[in-house]
Image: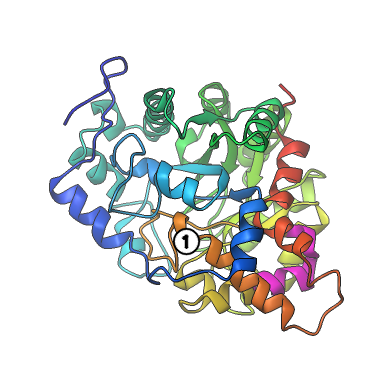
Amino acid sequence: MAADSTTGLPLKPSSGLAGLIDARVNRTLLAPRPLSAEAARLHGELRVVDLHADFLLWNRGAWEFSSRGHLDRQRLHQGNVAIQVCAAVTGVPATALLGARRHPDRWDTIDLLGRLQGWPRQTRSSRLARALYQAEKLKAIIAAAGDSPIPLKLITSCRDIDEVLDCRSQGEALIGVILALEGAHALEGNPANIQPLFQAGYRILGLTHFMDNAMAGAAEGKTGHGLTPAGQTLVQQAQELGMLLDLAHASEETIEDLLGMTSRPVMASHGGVRATSDSPRNLGPAQVAAIGRTEGVVGIGLFARALGGQSLTLVSRAMDYVATRAGLEHVALGSDFDGFVSTVVDSAGLPRITQALLRHLEGREAEPSFASKKAIAGIMGENVLRVLRQTLPGE
C-alpha cells in the first residue's frame, strides 16, 4: 500500500478483504433525489456539524472522492458540512457485528481490521496505540489536502472553530475536523492516559462503546455498571482539560452517574430515542431531558437501530421528539457514517435531512418558533457550535 512520504501512514485506499468489508458494511440506502428550491437554498446557508463518523477505521485514501462508504472531502463539501467529528474506534467485539445485545470484551475485530490494512505492529496489542495511530492518520490526511480546493483543519480550540467558520463565510471550502474517542477503552484502565490523547488532539471523550471498560459501563455491556472510581477521576480530568463528554453507548447507570457529577454540557453523539426505536442504547425520555438540562445535545443517528427503520421521516420524527422533551436547542445530527452501518443518506445527501425537517416542521401543529428555519439551523449545526464553545479550550 502506498504511504505518505513524510509520515509513512497509508493514504491510498486499501484493497482486498478490508476494501470488500468497507463496501459491504458502510452502505447508503436511499438513492439521490432532487431537492426543492427552498431546501437547497436553506441548506446552503447552514453551518452543518455532524457529531460522529468512523472514517478513521478505514484506509480509504486522503479523503479524496471514493465510491465506498459515506464520506470524503468532496461529499462533505457537497453536503455543506462545516465541521465533521471523526471518532477513533479502538475495540469492537465480534458479538456486536453478529447482532447480540450483550457484549464481552473479547474477540476484538479492530485488531483484525488493523492487520488487514497494515496498521503498525504496536496497535495489535494496545488500544492506546490504536487511538494515537488514528490521530496521526487524520493529521496526515489533513497535510495531504494541502492547498487543495477543499482543505481540512484539525479543531482543538474555540479559536480554531472561529477560523473555520470565518473562512467559510468568505467563500472558502475549508472543513473543520474534531477528534473523538469512541470509548474509554483507549485509556487501558489508566485515567492519566487522557493526557497523551489530549496532546494528540482529541477533544471529545466517549466513555463507552459496545462493551464495559475500566471507567464506565456500556448500554450493551455484560454488566452495564456505572462510573467506576477511575471513571470519576477521568471525567474530572477530561473536563479540566476542556473535553466534551459523550454518553453514546453508555449504560443507564453511567448516564445517571455522570449527570450527577457535572454541571457542564454533555452530549449523546449518535443514537436515537426509545420512543421511536426501543433499542437498549437509545435514550429514554428522562435521559433526553436530563442531557438538555446540562445545556448539552442529543445527536440523532441515520441508521436503522437509532431510528426504528430506514427513512427520512423517522429522522425528523426522532429529532422532533428530542425537541419536545428537551427543547429545540438540544437537538443535533450524529450520523454514525462509516460505522459498520447502512445510513439513509451519505454526507453528500445531508441536504435531504434539511428538506425532511422542512416538510416535517411545516406540517406539524406546533408553535411558530418551532416551524422555523432558525430551528433547522440549530438542529443541523448551531446547537453543537454552542456546546463546543462552552466546553473546548479557548485557544
Question: What secondary structure is the magenta-colored segment mainly?
Answer: helix
Q: Is residue 328 left or right of residue 253?
A: right
Query: In terms of image quadrants, where is residue 6?
Result: top left
Label 1 packing within 10 angstroms: few (<14), some (14-19), many (20+): many
- Seen at 53% across and 57% down, the residue is 218
Q: In x, y percent, where is residue 133?
A: 37, 28
Q: Is residue 385 left or right of residue 272?
A: right
- Seen at 60% across and 73% down, the residue is 356
In the depicted structure, whether residue 15 falls above or below residue 1 = below
Q: Is residue 224 left or right of residue 391?
A: left
Residue type at mark 1: give it. Gly
Q: Residue furthest top?
A: 6
Q: Residue furthest front?
A: 37
**In the depicted view, which residue is nearer to us: 46 or 121?**
46
Q: In x, y percent, where is residue 307?
A: 53, 74
Disc 1: which residue: 349
Residue 226, visible in the rendered structure = no
Q: In x, y percent, where is residue 173?
A: 53, 37
Q: Tell me which segment is drawn in magenta.
A: 318-330
The question of residue 106 being in magenta is answered with: no
Query: In terms of image quadrants, where is residue 29?
Result: bottom left
Q: In x, y percent, where is residue 72?
A: 39, 45
In the depicted structure, whether residue 64 falls above or below residue 39 = above
Residue 121, visible in the rendered structure = yes
Secondary structure state at the residue bearing disc 1: helix
- Seen at 16% across and 44% down, the residue is 15
- Seen at 60% across and 67% down, the residue is 37
